[in-house]
Image: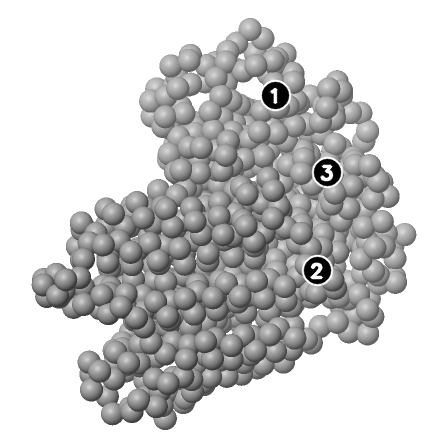
Amino acid sequence: MMKRTATVLAALLLAAGCSNGNSNSSGGSSNTPGVTDSSILIGTHQPLTGPAAAGYSEIAPATKAYFDYVNANGGVYGRKITYKIMDDGYNPANTQQVVRQLVLQDKVFAIVNGLGTPTHTGVLDFLKTNRVPDLFVASGSRTWNQPDKYPGTFGFNPDYTVEGKILASYVKQTYAGKKVCFLGQDDDFGRDSLEGVEKVLGPVAAKQTYVVTNPNVGPQMGAFKAAACDVVILASIPGFTALSIGTAAKIGFKPQFVVSNVGSDPSTLTKTLGAAAPLLEGVVAANYLPLDTDESNPWIQLYKKVNSQYNGNAAFDNNVVYGMSVGYLFVQALQAAGKDLTRDKLTEAVQKGGFTGPALVPTRFSAQDHSGYAGEQITKLTGGKATYLGTPYTTDDADGAVTAYSGAAATPPQNGIPPAQ
Amino acid sequence: MTIVEPRAARTKNRQKSARVRKISPLLVVIAGAIIVVALTYTLPPFRNYQLATIGAYLCVTAGLTVLTGLNGQLSLGHGALMATGAYTLALWQNKFDLLLPGIMLAVLVTTVAGGVIGLAAARLRGPYLAGLTLAVAVVVPSITSTFDKTFNSDQGLSVALDPPPGVLPVEQWQAWICWAGALVTVLVLAYLIRGRFGRDLRAVRDDETAAKLAGVGVARTQVMAFVVSAACAGLSGALFAVLAQSVSPGAFPLTLSLFLVMAIVIGGLGRLTGALIGAFLLVVLPSVAQSIAEDAGSQHLEGNLALTFFGIVLVLVMLAAPGGLASLKFPRRSRKQKGQ
């Protein structure tokens, strides 16, 4: 018996020892994990499968394609970027596992664009303990904006409270006197968004929540119908935006839908709704990046070129635009961090801010503010395409006013790669 | 680990002599502790984290193999019991931040939950029992979203943890905590099933009527078995909360409960060694599957390949060794394990 246990433990030791050998290969000449003279290893966690895969699974490949484009043009200070994408299925428990693997086993330099509010929240402490820069989280939760608590974490999306305020002020102007209701994801995403909406509109007529593990919003839509809502604001991921619009139509409920940016990509929604796609006509949403259908925009031209050369000509939609914009911003940050790359220099460079890129609004990065882009512009869906209305708006996540932003959008550099600073 | 052997020796008339009986479980556990501590000093952090995960799994597989293997009750709901322990610890830690009492409380609360389920389970047989426990596993996400003020729905709760004492790396500290829990569990179970309780378990499993005639309280034994294995699951859940520093319903899905049953069957039902092999496979197979998927260049495979892997291993093991990996005889076994 003793022998048997010993054998099992010995086998364990052997297996551990074997796998140990090939995991220490990274590191290189400098002391910074994941960085050598010729390479930078970064990682991310993304919902490539599971309830949030619709649409979102295209983001990381697009980011990777942009990095490949940069690599093919000489990289950043001669370093090629390797982007390791891990699937967490939008399940916080998996995120724990894959992020540990990236940091402890693969020894990545930084985590870039980890996607999801519930998923990423769980790894903040771990990343902080290991001093890993946690850049451009793909979510608008205000959790990322805690410079004192999480000095290495920075958001990318405009935070959901900012977005809620902008959507709500459009609703206030356009649908004055109408009954406004709210459906949000049952986590910080929905809560932050509702807070922004109520800052502008006051208490909504009815509010409901959904959970991603239960793909049924029948009761919620039924409650809205019973409350005779005229406008329904959705803080939802694409799958649940489509589900809500479809379910409402099924029970003969036709309110004006106003949708959060993260749940509003027209291509994803059209694909998800299939034959019911005409229901999307007139849906109001918001964005802060160039729209995929805007052929005359120089950023879209650049992204389309990268998409055809390095992304296997994947279907070009706003998720691809998003992914490449993340890649562009990260390369900007690397350029700003300088040739002698360390983790501290990277976070300092991001904190200094001042990045101008594809977005219609500036980033808010500073020593006191780690949230992403400062605002959004309203879009409307007509004929399966989104178009911008009016001007971009910026605001803060507190009680500041929603103000129009008049700065001009930047044009991409000639070669499509941010210049060294 | 020693305990299953006497049964085998007696009931199946194996030729293994009494030699094996003499080694006390305490010695095995002490040896195990020494090996684990030595491992934590040699392994890199991520391997330590995996080692810790094996320890946390061992708690629940050991309890489950006693319930299913020795008492014949099939539970598909142990994932839910783990969730009970994990959420208890999370709520406690966020209020008081005292780890050891928190873990004990988690075990206690899960024991009570296990008692309630066990009372119902003792009245049910075969598929009905599986059905009941299955329902328990399925209901976890609904509970967390119904009482979202307390459990915070799908996002779950974070678990406040003090940094480890001194300059100890977090992963090493976690490995120690988890294996302390695992080894204590194994020790307690080993002594429990060695004595009268173990004989009652087997008597009830083999023939309830005969057991009753012999004066064994059938229902009482079944409830006790469920309570003991629930306590182990609660400890395991609490350790997982310590490991992940967060709890969410996604960490305790139905597939986890199924994986646990599969692991103990592959390892060898009713044997604590089998529980150890099972816990090891629960950690190793998914990571092997993942690296294969990665080499194949398809990230979309990752989520599903582990299941396929477990299925294939289960079929192969059942063909080659119906009693599980732990039942293989020595010369063959050592070869087999290197191949894992």
Q: CA distance from mark 1 to mark 2?
A: 45 Å
Q: Position of residue A361 (x, y in %)?
A: 76, 33
Please indicate whether residue A61 sits to the left or right of residue B72 in the image: right
Residue A24 versus residue A412 in the image, above or below:
below
Query: Who's the residue at 48% across and 41% down the image?
Result: B154
Q: Please indicate, yes or no, whether residue A140 appears anywhere in the rendered image.
A: no
Q: Amino acid at mark 2?
A: Pro
Callout 1: SS? helix
Numbered disc 3: what chain? A
Query: Mark 2 sits on what residue?
Result: B165
Q: Amino acid at mark 3?
A: Asn
Q: Please indicate, yes or no, whether residue A137 appears anywhere in the rendered image.
A: yes
Query: Who's the residue at 61% across and 18% down the image?
Result: A198
Callout 3: SS? loop
Query: Who's the residue at 18% across and 67% down the image?
Result: B203
Query: Mark 3 sits on what residue?
Result: A145
Mark seen at residue A197: 1
Residue A341 versus residue A163 in the image, above or below:
below
> Pointer 3 and pointer 1: residues touching (CB < 8 Å)?
no
Residue A291 versus residue B129 in the image, above or below:
above
Query: Who's the residue at 63% across and 31% down the image?
Result: A160
Looking at the image, which residue sits at the far top? A177
